[in-house]
Image (spheres, grey):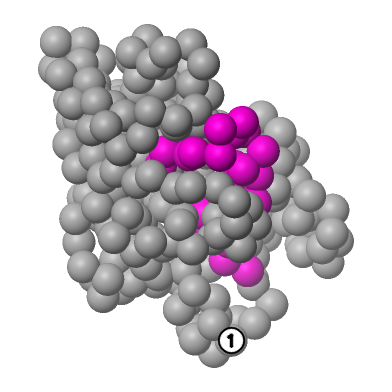
Amino acid sequence: MPHRQPIGVFDSGLGGLTVLKELVHVLPEYDYVYLGDSARAPYGTKDFETVYQYTLQAVNWLFQQGCPLVIVACNTASAKALRTIQQRDLPGIDPTRRVLGVIRPTTEVIGDHTDSGHVGILGTQGTVDSGSYAIEIAKFFPEVQVHQLACPAWVPLVESGDYLDPAKADPLIEDCLRQLAEQSPLIDTILLACTHYPLLYPRILSKLPAHIDLVTQGEIVADSLSSYLQRHPQMEERLSRGGEIDFTTTGDPTVFGGAASQFWGSPLKARQVHL
Ligand code: DGL
C-alpha cells in the first residue's frame, strides 16, 4: 500500500476545485489528490451508463493512488453513479474504503436557508433529469417546494475560460435566472447544484435581488466531511497528514492549471494522467 493515503476528490473537470478549496480550508492537515476528467467533460449531457463508467474509472484510479476515501465532487456523477458504486461495486473492490458525494450533505441543510419554502436548484441536465435533489430534499424538508432548471451552457462557459468575459457570460447567466424566476416569484434561495457554477458566483449574485440567498456547496461539503471524520475515527486515522495537494487532469495540464489558478488564488501546477 502506498505511504501516502490522501483524500481523493473527483470532478468531470475544473468544478470540483471549488469543493477542494473549502476542504483544504477546513481540513488543511490531510493530503489530497484532485482528479478532473477535463478530456471527457462535460458529464452533464451524457447518459447514465457513460457517467457511471467514467466515474467508476476515476474512483478506481484514485484508489490506486492510495486514497481510502473519495469525494465525488460532481453533482452529475453523484446523481447518476454514486449509489451504484457504493452499493454494487465497492463491496467487491474494497469494503473498507468509502466514496461520498455532494448531494446528500447539501440536501440535509438547504431547507434551513429558505423562509418562503421555495428553493431554486440550478444544475446540469443530468442532475435535473435525475430528480435527485427533489427526492432528497423531500426526505429532510418535506414542506419545501423545489424548482429546478438545467443551465447547459454554463459548464462549457467555465471550462473554456469564457466566464471571465462578462460580455460572453452575462447573457447566458441572465437567461437562466429569468427562466428560474418565471417558475415562481417566491424563490428566496438558489442552490448552485453544479460544482462548476461557483466560478460564476459574482456574476450571478450581481443579477439577483438582495433578498435571494445564493448557496454554493463547497463549505457545506467540507463541514459534512469534517463531521464524518469525527464520527469515523478508523477512517480518519488512515488518512496521511502531509498537507500536500496533487492536481491531476485527463485534459491539457497547462490549460487546466491556467484556468484553475484564476479562482484557486495562486498558480496551480497540474499533471496529466490517463484513466
Ligand atoms: N461539475 C459537475 C457537477 O457538479 C458537472 C459538470 C459537467 O457537466 O461535466 O454536476
**Count of numbered circles in the view:** 1
Q: As displayed, is residue 23 above or below residue 37?
A: above
Task: Give the image location of residue 127, x and y in percent.
Answer: 34, 55
User: Which residue, as the protein is rendered here, is positioned at the far bottom?
Assistant: 92
Task: Give the image location of residue 128, x and y in percent.
Answer: 32, 54
Residue at left 24%, top 26%? Answer: 178
Res. 47 visible in picture: yes
Residue at left 54%, top 82%? Answer: 87
Q: Quadrant of the N terminus?
A: bottom right
Q: Is residue 242 left or right of residue 245?
A: right
Q: Which residues are magenta?
A: 98-121
Task: Give the image location of residue 193, x and y in percent.
Answer: 42, 43
Q: Is residue 261 left or right of residue 43?
A: right
Residue at left 38%, top 16%? Answer: 208
Residue at left 45%, top 78%? Answer: 84
Q: Quadrant of the C terminus?
A: bottom left
Say if disc 1 is inside 8 Å of ligand 1: no
Q: Is residue 67 left or right of residue 166?
A: right
Q: Nearer the viewer, residue 148 or 86?
A: 148
- Report which residue position mark 1 lands on: 91
Choose top left, top right, bottom left or bottom right for residue 53: bottom left
Choose top left, top right, bottom left or bottom right for residue 180: top left
Task: Tell me which amino acid carries mark 1.
Answer: Pro
